[in-house]
Image (cartoon, rainbow, N blue to C red):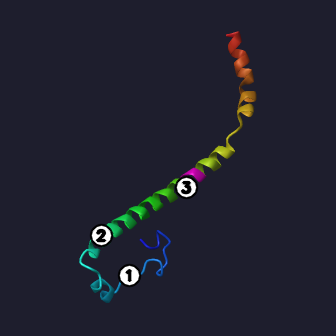
Amino acid sequence: MRDRLHFSRDQSPIPNLSQLNDLSHSEPILIPFTCSSLNALASMTKQLDTITTQLATVQSTVATLPTFLAMENVLTPITASIGDL
């Protein structure tokens, strides 16, 4: 999870046994909430990366499409022929 969030070991150190024993009686309740929050954040980060990649693909696809003016010029003979029908 640390890698997905781009956290260094300094930013999210793993507590040793001595540090865990020094916690007050109410502090350990925060550990599962913190882990759940970090897991949710990591999942959202992964989904955001996926969306960013998909948007880049869409942008490159749209860039290759002809402009409206180019399509209109191609369709002009067809539109003119419809009036003759």
For residue 49, above or below residue 85: below
Q: Write down the residue under mark 2.
A: 32
Residue type of the residue flagged with mark 1:
Ile
Q: Residue at x 34, y 86 (%)?
A: 16
Q: Between 2 and 83, which is closer to the camera in this rendering? A: 2
Residue type of the residue flagged with mark 3:
Thr
Q: Write down the residue under mark 1.
A: 14
- Residue 17: horizontal and vertical position, in percent? 30, 87
Horizontal relation, residue 54 to residue 60: left or right: left
Main secondary structure found in the magenta portion:
helix
Q: Residue at x 31, y 89 (%)?
A: 18
Q: Residue at x 27, y 71 (%)?
A: 29
Instruction: Classify mark 3: helix, strand or loop.
Output: helix
Mark 2 neighbour class, 10 Å CA radius: few under 14, some 14 to 19, many 20 or more: few
Mark 3 neighbour class, 10 Å CA radius: few under 14, some 14 to 19, many 20 or more: few
Residue 34 quadrant: bottom left
| Quarter of the figure with the N terminus | bottom left
Which portion, as a residue range, is magenta? Answer: 52-56
- Residue 40: horizontal and vertical position, in percent? 38, 62
Residue type of the residue flagged with mark 2:
Pro
Mark 1 neighbour class, 10 Å CA radius: few under 14, some 14 to 19, many 20 or more: few
- Residue 24: horizontal and vertical position, in percent? 27, 80
Q: Write down the residue under mark 3.
A: 52
